[in-house]
Structures are given as structure tokens and as C-alpha cells.
Amino acid sequence: MIPNDSPWIKQLQRTRKVVPISGSTDTDVLIVGGGIAGVVTAYFTLTTTTKKVVLLEADKIAHGATGHNAGQITSYFERPLYELVEQYGLDLAIDGQKSIESGWLLLDEIVSQAQLRTPVYRFTGYTGLTTSEQLVMYLRNNAHRAKGGMPAESIVVAAEWPGLTQIPAEYLHLYTVAPHADILSLLESKNPDYIASLSYQKGCMNSALFSEELIGYLAATFPDRFSFFEGSPVTTVTLEKSGGTAEAIGHRVTATHIVLCTNGFENFHLTNTAGKEIDTKFHHLVNGRIGYMAGYIEPLTNPPTAISYFPKNTNPSKDPTGEPYFYLTRRPHEHQGAVSYNLLCMGGPEKVLPDQATYLRSDACSEDAHGTIDEFLRSNYNNYPEGGTEYAFCWHGLMGYTPNGIRRVGFEPRNKVLLYNLGCNGVGILPSIFGGKRIAQLLSGVSLPPSIFDPYSDE
């Protein structure tokens, strides 16, 4: 049995006691969910409005998906940009892409304003491609980025690749050619299947430590307007015409607005007394996927990085329920009291959470998934120890995928008392941060133009 042991949770070393809600209260804004989405939504609401905020977390701050991820900071959707253009049009799709990338500046703002010490590593990251279909997909994305006035992602194709002459002429200006050995060097891989590399800004961060630090800042800075309670699972949410009420462990929180910053798998009932039924609709907002990750300690000889790998049996143009890819993150890590090591993390294996099934964080890691990760590293990662390695961590986390693969950020169409900032879709850090800012703007009465993130009615 391999326990679910996240390095990000271990790094917290928290001593704060869990304080559940102990009485009923009124507030302007109730935030349900204490992961990075909920904490950042609280941050922007408190710093840009005068509203009073209460946050309820069922477990502990940042102990859900925020503390059980791979820690990559990326600015892409797990849907090709060209598909978003086909569905929403160029302007809305490009605006959505720009919105996600704006999360970098928002992250900088938070770190500076709150004087957080959580390391945020930023660098050029890479994606390895193995097929012409994958390559053409990213070239199509690049064409739309250029047409929309965005900088193109750098794509380098191996000069020795036989398919080079088959690339459509319309994409000739969107890539460069280099020796195959250079492609493999960028990807830190020994697998000759990789025929192209895509590079763009990426990063890595312990989002659990970030959230824990930030909520401490909020509690100290806004003691008259902010309170949060852990160990306080919400059981019912009742929406009325001009406000709503949530019940948690026998106590009620009444608020003008309620914001759900969750993974969508809450065991509560949502009643709308001022419009059409929402409960069933809400509980089908996301589909669950359990992501498995593992990590081991290696010498501090290489810089931080984040690399994604698309093997030949993976088609990244599929929707988020398609075959998974692999993702590697490397960063400095405190081991045995000294920051003189790197933590090498790899993820990729996933399992669909059946409808109505309960995800248990206490479940052991999948030995099959652990073996798949090790096998992939052995075959792909240049610096994998020749004699094998002992894994220091193995963990899993629940990701929520919206049906259209796009985070839901905004008002519930059937009752604007309720707002959403939810839907991990596999790459949640920057979308969570952007979503928190957008929610605060909506709460302050800013009239925002239509967005691909807007929750929609299926009527």
C-alpha cells in the first residue's frame, strides 16, 4: 500500500488548529471552498471592495486539489485554441487566452502586496510532440494567436524528421527547424520519438503553501471584514431573490452573494426559491478525474523546469476526457532540513470518477499508476538514475472538468445571488487567480463584457 502523501501538504508544517464555525452570522459575501480559488477570490474581494467576507472550508485550507496537484503554472486550456475560435469566434477566444495569461501579473501583484515568501519559479517551459497531427494542431493554434495579436509560442521541428516536407505551407512562418538532438536537449529526453518542441512561459509553485500564507495575510490585514472556518462542510445552500443562506454543521451563514470556489463534488443540496431549479444542473457542472503523481529527490544540479510530453498514443486535440499526457516539474526542495536537492515530480495517469461516486483522499495511491510513471521516466527523462530511484512521494488529487473544458467564472444565470469560480480542467492555478479577480469585479458592480468563462444556461 502506497499512502497518498503530497509533498506540498508536508511542506506546510502548519500548527494552526482547525476552528469550525460555532455560530450563525451575516456577511456580504460567503465563499465556499478554501483552495487557491477561494482564497484568491477572498483576497481580491477584500482588497478591491469594502465588503465583508466569510469563507467556509469543509476540511483544511488548501488540503484538497490545491494541495494535491503537480504544481505546474501554465497558461493553456486543455482544449486547442483553434477549437475555442471555432466555438466562440476569434475575439472571444483570444480574450479568454489573454485573460488566463493575465494571471501571471495578478500572481505577481498578490505576492508583492502580501509580501509572501512562497517561492514562485518562472521560466521557459517545454512541450514535446511526437506526431504530425499534434504538430499541426499547435501550428493552427499559433496561427490564431498571431491573428489575434498575441505572441506566438515558439515551435521548433527536427530537421531530420521525414514529415517536415508535409507541413502545410500556410504554417511555414510559424516554426523553425533545428537538429533533432537540440529538440531532445530542450525536452531533457532520450526518447527519439519527439520530433518537435513547443516553448512558452511556465512556472511552478506550491499552491498549498501560497494559499496558507495568503489566508494568514487576509486574517491579519482585514480582521473586521474577514473570517474563515475550517472543518465546516456546507450541507445546504438556499437562494432567495436578494440573498442566500448556507448551513454548515448546524449553523447558518446569510449572505448577499454566495461564491462556490470548489471542485464541484460537494454533498450539499442547492435550493433556488426565486427561480428555476439549480441543484441537479449544478451537480453536473463538472466531471471528476483522479490524477496520480509521484516524485523523488535528485541533486540540485539542474534549474527549475516544467515539461509536458505527448506520446504517440496521445491526441491532445481530444476533449478533456481523452487520453492523458505526462507532465514533469522540477524545483528546489527542502529535504532533511536543507534546500540542497531538487524534487522531480511526474504526473499523467488518470482515472475517471464514476458518476455519484465518492472520492476519498485517504485512499492509497494506485500501484499501477506509480509503475506507469516510473516506466515513463525511465524511457524519457535524461537524468533518471541509471540504477533506478526510491520515490519520496506518491499522491493523487481530484480534478473537476467542466463539460466544455473551460472554467466557470461568473453569475449563475438562474439566480445572480450565486457565483462560480470553479472547474480545474487540469490546469488550475492561473485560471483560479484570474477567476478570483473577475469575481471581485462582478461583486463590485463592474459591468464586464461577455466571456467564454461565463456560466451559461442549458435551456
Image (cartoon, rainbow, N blue to C red):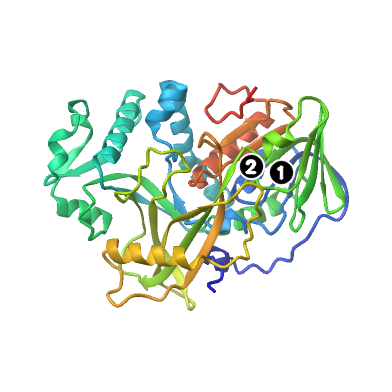
CA gap, disc 2 and disc 1: 8 Å
Vertical order, 162 against 257 (above or below): below
The image's mark for residue 41 is 2
Q: Residue at x 38, y 54 (%)?
A: 326
Q: Tell me which residue sits at (87%, 50%) in the image.
A: 251
Q: Estimate the x, y position of residue 159 in percent, counting from the top left.
A: 12, 44
Q: Which residue is mark 1?
A: 31
Residue 224: image location, x then y, percent: 78, 47
| Label pair 2/1, CB-CB below 8 angstroms | yes
Q: Position of residue 214 (x, y in %)?
A: 61, 53
Q: Nearer the viewer, residue 8 or 376?
A: 376
Q: Residue at x 15, y 51 (%)?
A: 180
Q: Nearer the viewer, residue 6 or 304?
A: 6
Name the secondary structure under disc 1: strand
Amino acid at circle 1: Ile
Q: Amino acid at mark 2?
A: Thr
Q: Is residue 403 above or below residue 394?
A: above
In the rendered image, which quarter is residue 18 located in? bottom right
Q: Is residue 172 left or right of residue 225?
A: left
Of pointers 2 and 1, the one earlier in the residue sequence: 1
Q: For the residue labelled by badge 2, is the local secondary structure a helix, a strand or a loop?
A: helix
Q: Quadrant of the C terminus?
A: top right
**Residue at screen point 43% across, 46% down:** 74
Local crowd size for mark 2, using a 10 Å CA cut-off: few (<14), some (14–19), many (≥20): many
